Image (cartoon, grey):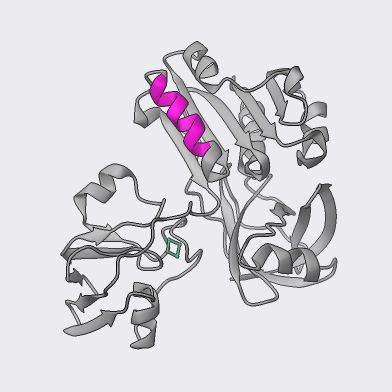
Amino acid sequence: MLAVRVCEVRHAAIDVLSLVLASLDGGPLPACTAGAHVDVALPNGMLRQYSLCRTGPALRFYEIAILHDRDGRGGSACAHRDIRPGDTLQISPPRNLFPLLPAGRPVLFAGGIGITPILAMAEALHAAGRDFELHYCSRSPERAAYRDTLARAAYAPQLRLYHDSTPEAGRLDAEAVLRRAGADAHLYVCGPAGFISHVCGAARQAGWDESRVHFEHFAAPAQPAVAAGGFELILARRGLRVPVGPTETAAQALLAHGVALNLSCEQGVCGACLLPVLDGLPDHRDVFLSPAERDTGRCFTPCCSRALSPTLTIDL
Ligand code: FES
Protein backbone atom coordinates (compact mmCIF):
# COMPACT_ATOMS: atom_id res chain seq x y z
CA MET A 1 0.00 0.00 0.00
CA LEU A 2 1.04 3.60 -0.56
CA ALA A 3 0.37 6.49 1.81
CA VAL A 4 -1.17 9.54 0.16
CA ARG A 5 -2.36 12.89 1.45
CA VAL A 6 -5.86 14.18 0.70
CA CYS A 7 -5.13 17.58 -0.86
CA GLU A 8 -8.67 18.54 -1.76
CA VAL A 9 -12.18 17.34 -1.14
CA ARG A 10 -14.53 18.79 -3.75
CA HIS A 11 -18.25 18.60 -4.31
CA ALA A 12 -18.39 17.12 -7.84
CA ALA A 13 -22.19 16.66 -8.09
CA ILE A 14 -25.12 15.87 -5.82
CA ASP A 15 -23.93 13.00 -3.59
CA VAL A 16 -20.52 12.86 -5.30
CA LEU A 17 -17.25 13.92 -3.68
CA SER A 18 -14.02 14.07 -5.57
CA LEU A 19 -10.75 13.55 -3.70
CA VAL A 20 -7.43 14.86 -4.97
CA LEU A 21 -4.56 12.75 -3.62
CA ALA A 22 -0.80 13.37 -3.59
CA SER A 23 2.21 11.44 -2.33
CA LEU A 24 3.42 12.47 1.13
CA ASP A 25 6.68 13.91 -0.26
CA GLY A 26 4.99 15.62 -3.22
CA GLY A 27 6.85 13.40 -5.71
CA PRO A 28 5.30 11.66 -8.70
CA LEU A 29 2.80 8.89 -8.12
CA PRO A 30 3.02 5.46 -9.80
CA ALA A 31 2.16 5.54 -13.49
CA CYS A 32 -1.32 4.48 -14.53
CA THR A 33 -3.31 4.09 -17.71
CA ALA A 34 -6.90 5.05 -18.52
CA GLY A 35 -9.38 2.66 -16.91
CA ALA A 36 -7.15 1.99 -13.87
CA HIS A 37 -8.41 1.97 -10.31
CA VAL A 38 -6.88 2.02 -6.84
CA ASP A 39 -8.00 0.24 -3.69
CA VAL A 40 -8.55 2.77 -0.91
CA ALA A 41 -8.46 1.81 2.78
CA LEU A 42 -11.28 3.89 4.24
CA PRO A 43 -11.24 5.27 7.80
CA ASN A 44 -13.69 2.57 8.92
CA GLY A 45 -11.33 -0.20 7.77
CA MET A 46 -13.23 -1.08 4.58
CA LEU A 47 -11.28 -1.47 1.36
CA ARG A 48 -12.98 -0.02 -1.71
CA GLN A 49 -12.03 0.37 -5.37
CA TYR A 50 -12.25 3.73 -7.11
CA SER A 51 -11.35 4.53 -10.70
CA LEU A 52 -8.76 7.19 -11.39
CA CYS A 53 -10.30 10.12 -13.26
CA ARG A 54 -6.98 11.20 -14.71
CA THR A 55 -4.12 8.96 -15.65
CA GLY A 56 -0.64 9.26 -17.06
CA PRO A 57 3.02 8.34 -16.66
CA ALA A 58 4.13 10.65 -13.83
CA LEU A 59 1.17 12.30 -12.15
CA ARG A 60 1.60 14.49 -9.08
CA PHE A 61 -2.06 14.02 -8.19
CA TYR A 62 -4.60 11.25 -8.46
CA GLU A 63 -8.28 12.10 -8.49
CA ILE A 64 -11.10 9.77 -7.56
CA ALA A 65 -14.81 10.42 -7.16
CA ILE A 66 -17.07 8.69 -4.66
CA LEU A 67 -20.82 8.43 -4.97
CA HIS A 68 -22.65 8.27 -1.64
CA ASP A 69 -24.54 5.00 -2.00
CA ARG A 70 -27.26 5.25 0.61
CA ASP A 71 -28.11 1.56 0.18
CA GLY A 72 -24.47 0.46 0.27
CA ARG A 73 -22.51 -1.37 2.95
CA GLY A 74 -21.11 1.79 4.57
CA GLY A 75 -17.94 2.45 2.56
CA SER A 76 -19.13 5.50 0.63
CA ALA A 77 -21.01 6.85 3.66
CA CYS A 78 -17.78 6.69 5.66
CA ALA A 79 -15.82 8.39 2.87
CA HIS A 80 -18.33 11.24 2.66
CA ARG A 81 -18.55 11.64 6.42
CA ASP A 82 -14.98 11.12 7.59
CA ILE A 83 -12.44 12.06 4.91
CA ARG A 84 -11.13 15.63 5.21
CA PRO A 85 -8.39 17.63 3.47
CA GLY A 86 -5.03 16.90 5.09
CA ASP A 87 -5.93 13.30 5.99
CA THR A 88 -3.55 10.49 5.10
CA LEU A 89 -5.00 7.46 3.33
CA GLN A 90 -3.49 4.15 2.32
CA ILE A 91 -4.08 3.19 -1.31
CA SER A 92 -2.89 0.34 -3.50
CA PRO A 93 -0.81 0.94 -6.62
CA PRO A 94 -3.08 1.44 -9.66
CA ARG A 95 -4.39 -1.69 -11.34
CA ASN A 96 -6.12 -1.71 -14.72
CA LEU A 97 -8.81 -4.30 -15.42
CA PHE A 98 -10.54 -2.05 -17.96
CA PRO A 99 -7.82 -0.96 -20.39
CA LEU A 100 -8.30 0.79 -23.70
CA LEU A 101 -7.14 -1.30 -26.65
CA PRO A 102 -4.57 0.39 -28.85
CA ALA A 103 -6.67 -0.09 -31.99
CA GLY A 104 -10.25 0.55 -33.05
CA ARG A 105 -12.51 3.57 -32.61
CA PRO A 106 -13.79 3.70 -29.01
CA VAL A 107 -17.47 4.37 -28.32
CA LEU A 108 -17.63 5.30 -24.64
CA PHE A 109 -20.75 5.01 -22.48
CA ALA A 110 -20.94 6.25 -18.89
CA GLY A 111 -23.87 5.89 -16.51
CA GLY A 112 -23.73 8.14 -13.43
CA ILE A 113 -20.55 7.68 -11.41
CA GLY A 114 -19.33 5.37 -14.18
CA ILE A 115 -18.00 8.56 -15.76
CA THR A 116 -14.79 8.30 -13.70
CA PRO A 117 -12.84 5.74 -15.80
CA ILE A 118 -14.59 6.96 -18.94
CA LEU A 119 -13.37 10.53 -18.30
CA ALA A 120 -9.80 9.21 -18.03
CA MET A 121 -10.32 7.35 -21.30
CA ALA A 122 -11.67 10.44 -23.07
CA GLU A 123 -8.69 12.50 -21.89
CA ALA A 124 -6.21 9.81 -22.94
CA LEU A 125 -7.81 9.31 -26.34
CA HIS A 126 -7.88 13.04 -27.00
CA ALA A 127 -4.23 13.39 -25.93
CA ALA A 128 -3.31 10.56 -28.30
CA GLY A 129 -5.22 12.19 -31.17
CA ARG A 130 -7.60 9.22 -31.49
CA ASP A 131 -11.17 9.59 -32.64
CA PHE A 132 -13.93 8.54 -30.21
CA GLU A 133 -17.42 9.43 -29.04
CA LEU A 134 -18.77 9.64 -25.51
CA HIS A 135 -22.36 9.13 -24.31
CA TYR A 136 -22.97 10.14 -20.69
CA CYS A 137 -26.28 9.42 -18.91
CA SER A 138 -27.32 10.74 -15.52
CA ARG A 139 -30.49 11.34 -13.57
CA SER A 140 -30.15 15.14 -13.80
CA PRO A 141 -27.49 17.74 -14.72
CA GLU A 142 -26.88 18.33 -11.00
CA ARG A 143 -25.98 14.65 -10.55
CA ALA A 144 -23.63 14.49 -13.54
CA ALA A 145 -20.11 14.66 -12.06
CA TYR A 146 -17.50 16.36 -14.27
CA ARG A 147 -20.23 17.82 -16.51
CA ASP A 148 -18.50 21.22 -16.56
CA THR A 149 -15.08 19.68 -17.16
CA LEU A 150 -16.46 17.77 -20.12
CA ALA A 151 -18.35 20.79 -21.48
CA ARG A 152 -15.09 22.80 -21.48
CA ALA A 153 -12.97 20.02 -23.00
CA ALA A 154 -11.63 20.35 -26.51
CA TYR A 155 -13.44 17.11 -27.33
CA ALA A 156 -16.82 18.44 -26.13
CA PRO A 157 -18.28 18.13 -29.67
CA GLN A 158 -17.77 14.34 -29.36
CA LEU A 159 -19.80 14.27 -26.13
CA ARG A 160 -23.54 13.61 -25.84
CA LEU A 161 -25.27 14.10 -22.46
CA TYR A 162 -28.61 12.56 -21.51
CA HIS A 163 -30.53 13.36 -18.32
CA ASP A 164 -33.56 11.44 -17.05
CA SER A 165 -34.92 14.77 -15.76
CA THR A 166 -35.03 16.29 -19.25
CA PRO A 167 -36.10 13.49 -21.60
CA GLU A 168 -37.32 16.07 -24.12
CA ALA A 169 -33.65 16.89 -24.79
CA GLY A 170 -33.15 13.34 -26.06
CA ARG A 171 -32.85 9.85 -24.67
CA LEU A 172 -30.00 7.47 -25.28
CA ASP A 173 -30.74 4.97 -28.02
CA ALA A 174 -27.72 2.76 -27.45
CA GLU A 175 -28.64 0.31 -30.18
CA ALA A 176 -28.90 3.10 -32.77
CA VAL A 177 -25.54 4.52 -31.65
CA LEU A 178 -23.91 1.12 -31.91
CA ARG A 179 -25.48 0.32 -35.29
CA ARG A 180 -24.03 3.58 -36.62
CA ALA A 181 -20.54 2.86 -35.29
CA GLY A 182 -18.08 1.42 -37.77
CA ALA A 183 -16.90 -2.18 -37.95
CA ASP A 184 -13.66 -1.19 -36.17
CA ALA A 185 -15.51 0.35 -33.21
CA HIS A 186 -15.04 -0.94 -29.64
CA LEU A 187 -17.57 -0.34 -26.88
CA TYR A 188 -16.42 0.68 -23.38
CA VAL A 189 -19.13 1.03 -20.76
CA CYS A 190 -19.12 1.72 -17.03
CA GLY A 191 -21.94 2.49 -14.63
CA PRO A 192 -24.62 0.77 -12.58
CA ALA A 193 -25.23 -2.91 -13.36
CA GLY A 194 -28.58 -2.19 -15.08
CA PHE A 195 -26.96 0.42 -17.33
CA ILE A 196 -24.12 -1.92 -18.32
CA SER A 197 -26.53 -4.71 -19.00
CA HIS A 198 -28.73 -2.39 -21.14
CA VAL A 199 -25.81 -1.13 -23.26
CA CYS A 200 -24.23 -4.58 -23.66
CA GLY A 201 -27.67 -5.94 -24.63
CA ALA A 202 -27.97 -3.17 -27.24
CA ALA A 203 -24.56 -4.21 -28.61
CA ARG A 204 -25.79 -7.79 -28.97
CA GLN A 205 -28.97 -6.58 -30.70
CA ALA A 206 -26.83 -4.53 -33.06
CA GLY A 207 -24.86 -7.66 -33.93
CA TRP A 208 -21.64 -6.77 -32.11
CA ASP A 209 -19.18 -9.51 -31.32
CA GLU A 210 -18.39 -9.90 -27.59
CA SER A 211 -14.70 -9.28 -28.36
CA ARG A 212 -15.55 -5.63 -29.10
CA VAL A 213 -17.50 -5.12 -25.86
CA HIS A 214 -15.63 -3.99 -22.72
CA PHE A 215 -17.20 -3.07 -19.40
CA GLU A 216 -16.40 -2.52 -15.75
CA HIS A 217 -18.77 -3.00 -12.84
CA PHE A 218 -18.49 -0.94 -9.66
CA ALA A 219 -20.46 -3.42 -7.63
CA ALA A 220 -21.78 -6.87 -8.28
CA PRO A 221 -25.44 -6.98 -9.29
CA ALA A 222 -27.84 -8.74 -6.91
CA GLN A 223 -27.43 -12.51 -7.09
CA PRO A 224 -30.04 -15.23 -6.66
CA ALA A 225 -30.31 -16.63 -3.16
CA VAL A 226 -27.87 -19.35 -2.12
CA ALA A 227 -29.41 -22.83 -2.18
CA ALA A 228 -29.74 -24.37 1.25
CA GLY A 229 -26.84 -26.53 2.34
CA GLY A 230 -23.12 -26.11 2.30
CA PHE A 231 -20.21 -27.70 0.48
CA GLU A 232 -16.66 -28.68 1.23
CA LEU A 233 -13.50 -27.06 -0.09
CA ILE A 234 -10.56 -29.42 -0.55
CA LEU A 235 -7.20 -27.67 -0.52
CA ALA A 236 -5.18 -30.08 -2.66
CA ARG A 237 -1.68 -28.95 -1.78
CA ARG A 238 -2.33 -28.73 1.97
CA GLY A 239 -4.48 -31.83 2.21
CA LEU A 240 -7.03 -29.75 4.12
CA ARG A 241 -10.84 -30.01 3.96
CA VAL A 242 -12.79 -26.86 4.85
CA PRO A 243 -16.57 -27.00 5.22
CA VAL A 244 -18.43 -23.94 3.92
CA GLY A 245 -21.79 -23.35 5.56
CA PRO A 246 -24.87 -22.05 3.74
CA THR A 247 -24.55 -18.58 5.23
CA GLU A 248 -20.81 -18.02 4.91
CA THR A 249 -18.63 -17.33 1.91
CA ALA A 250 -15.81 -19.64 0.88
CA ALA A 251 -13.42 -16.84 1.80
CA GLN A 252 -14.86 -16.57 5.31
CA ALA A 253 -14.53 -20.32 5.81
CA LEU A 254 -10.93 -20.31 4.55
CA LEU A 255 -9.95 -17.35 6.74
CA ALA A 256 -11.53 -19.05 9.74
CA HIS A 257 -9.21 -22.01 9.07
CA GLY A 258 -6.18 -19.72 8.99
CA VAL A 259 -5.81 -19.73 5.20
CA ALA A 260 -4.57 -16.34 4.00
CA LEU A 261 -6.31 -14.92 0.93
CA ASN A 262 -5.79 -11.93 -1.30
CA LEU A 263 -9.08 -10.07 -0.78
CA SER A 264 -10.03 -6.66 -2.09
CA CYS A 265 -13.58 -5.82 -3.26
CA GLU A 266 -15.15 -8.88 -1.59
CA GLN A 267 -18.03 -8.78 -4.04
CA GLY A 268 -16.74 -10.51 -7.14
CA VAL A 269 -15.74 -7.43 -9.07
CA CYS A 270 -11.95 -7.13 -8.96
CA GLY A 271 -10.58 -10.68 -9.34
CA ALA A 272 -7.98 -10.20 -6.57
CA CYS A 273 -9.06 -13.39 -4.77
CA LEU A 274 -9.17 -15.67 -7.83
CA LEU A 275 -8.20 -19.30 -7.06
CA PRO A 276 -7.53 -22.21 -9.46
CA VAL A 277 -10.08 -25.05 -9.38
CA LEU A 278 -8.91 -28.64 -9.94
CA ASP A 279 -12.17 -30.51 -9.52
CA GLY A 280 -15.85 -29.83 -8.85
CA LEU A 281 -18.38 -27.36 -10.22
CA PRO A 282 -18.12 -23.72 -9.13
CA ASP A 283 -21.28 -21.64 -8.61
CA HIS A 284 -19.92 -18.39 -10.05
CA ARG A 285 -21.42 -15.33 -8.38
CA ASP A 286 -18.91 -12.75 -9.57
CA VAL A 287 -18.89 -10.32 -12.49
CA PHE A 288 -15.13 -10.56 -12.98
CA LEU A 289 -14.89 -13.75 -15.05
CA SER A 290 -16.15 -13.74 -18.63
CA PRO A 291 -18.81 -16.29 -19.61
CA ALA A 292 -16.10 -18.28 -21.44
CA GLU A 293 -13.85 -18.28 -18.35
CA ARG A 294 -16.75 -19.38 -16.19
CA ASP A 295 -17.56 -22.22 -18.56
CA THR A 296 -14.07 -23.68 -18.22
CA GLY A 297 -14.66 -24.02 -14.44
CA ARG A 298 -10.90 -23.64 -13.94
CA CYS A 299 -11.03 -20.85 -11.35
CA PHE A 300 -13.45 -19.16 -8.98
CA THR A 301 -13.69 -16.12 -6.71
CA PRO A 302 -14.02 -17.34 -3.09
CA CYS A 303 -15.15 -13.91 -1.85
CA CYS A 304 -18.62 -14.50 -3.31
CA SER A 305 -18.75 -17.69 -5.37
CA ARG A 306 -19.67 -21.13 -4.08
CA ALA A 307 -19.94 -24.70 -5.39
CA LEU A 308 -22.75 -26.55 -7.11
CA SER A 309 -21.03 -29.87 -6.37
CA PRO A 310 -20.68 -31.31 -2.83
CA THR A 311 -16.90 -30.63 -2.95
CA LEU A 312 -14.68 -28.18 -4.77
CA THR A 313 -10.98 -28.98 -5.00
CA ILE A 314 -8.73 -25.96 -5.30
CA ASP A 315 -5.02 -25.68 -6.07
CA LEU A 316 -4.02 -24.25 -2.72
S1 FES B 1 -11.99 -9.89 -3.69
FE1 FES B 1 -12.57 -8.93 -5.56
S2 FES B 1 -13.34 -10.61 -6.73
FE2 FES B 1 -12.93 -11.48 -4.79
Q: Residue at x 58, y 49 (%)?
A: 32
Q: Residue at x 45, y 70 (%)?
A: 263
**Where is residue 27 drawn, in percent x and y?**
73, 61
Is 293 located above or below residue 174 in the figure? below
Q: In the picture, which quadrant includes the C terminus?
A: bottom left
Quadrant of the rendered image containing residue 54: top right
Q: Residue at x 55, y 17 (%)?
A: 177
Q: Residue at x 40, y 52 (%)?
A: 288
Region in magenta: 196-205
Name the side, left or right, on which 295 lies relative to 22: left
Please state the total of marks drawn on the protein image: 0
Name the side, left or right, on which 201 lies relative to 65: left
Q: Main secondary structure of the magenta part?
A: helix
Q: In the picture, which quadrant includes the N terminus?
A: bottom right
**Where is residue 93 drawn, in percent x and y?**
57, 61
- Residue 260, visible in the rendered structure: no
